[in-house]
Image (cartoon, rainbow, N blue to C red):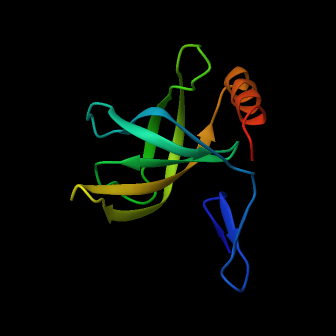
Amino acid sequence: MVIGGIMEFKRDNTERRKFPRVNTAFDVECSVEGVGHSEKRSLAKNIGMGGIYLITYKKLEIDSILSLKIHLPDGKEPFRTKGRLVWEREFTSQDSIVRYDVGIEFLKIEERNSQRLSLYISQLPN
């Protein structure tokens, strides 16, 4: 079954991604399209050409369209893109703060930013 084009599950429920992901950590600002809220800072945990996994402090709705400002740690200005929330998982950390793991499928990335993201990913260990 394909979920939002990001991951595919085999019959034994093991995950098989369409695009490889690499673990990383950098800031991402995100806001829900059409809601008018200000951007909230989140932390990227992994990224691939098809999407990104973030930790957020606010519950978001599945299928929400998000505006993302991605701060790759490559010394260049952040870039903007759009994504769709395909999964969310709530967790409470040791400091008793509720957080959310979220998976976002990229919807549209400009070619120059796609090339930049590809270069960044290729320089990280798998």
39 horizontally vs 85: left or right: left
Residue that sits furthest to the left in the current view: 96
Q: Quadrant of the N terminus?
A: bottom right
Q: How far across and how far down the image is residue 5, in percent? A: 67, 58
Q: Which residue is located at x 67 percent, y 24 percent? A: 113
- Image position of 43 with respect to 111: above or below: below
Q: Is residue 63 above or below residue 29?
A: below
Q: Is residue 119 above or below residue 90?
A: above
Q: Nearer the viewer, residue 37 or 10?
A: 10
The percent coordinates of residue 17 (x first, y second) are 72, 60
Count numbered badges in the picture.
0
- 84 lies above or below 119: below
Measuring from the top left, give residue 55's x and y in whole percent. Answer: 41, 49
Given residues 32 and 72, the one toward you in this image is: 72
Q: Position of residue 56 (x, y in %)?
A: 36, 47
Q: Nearer the viewer, residue 108 or 20?
A: 20
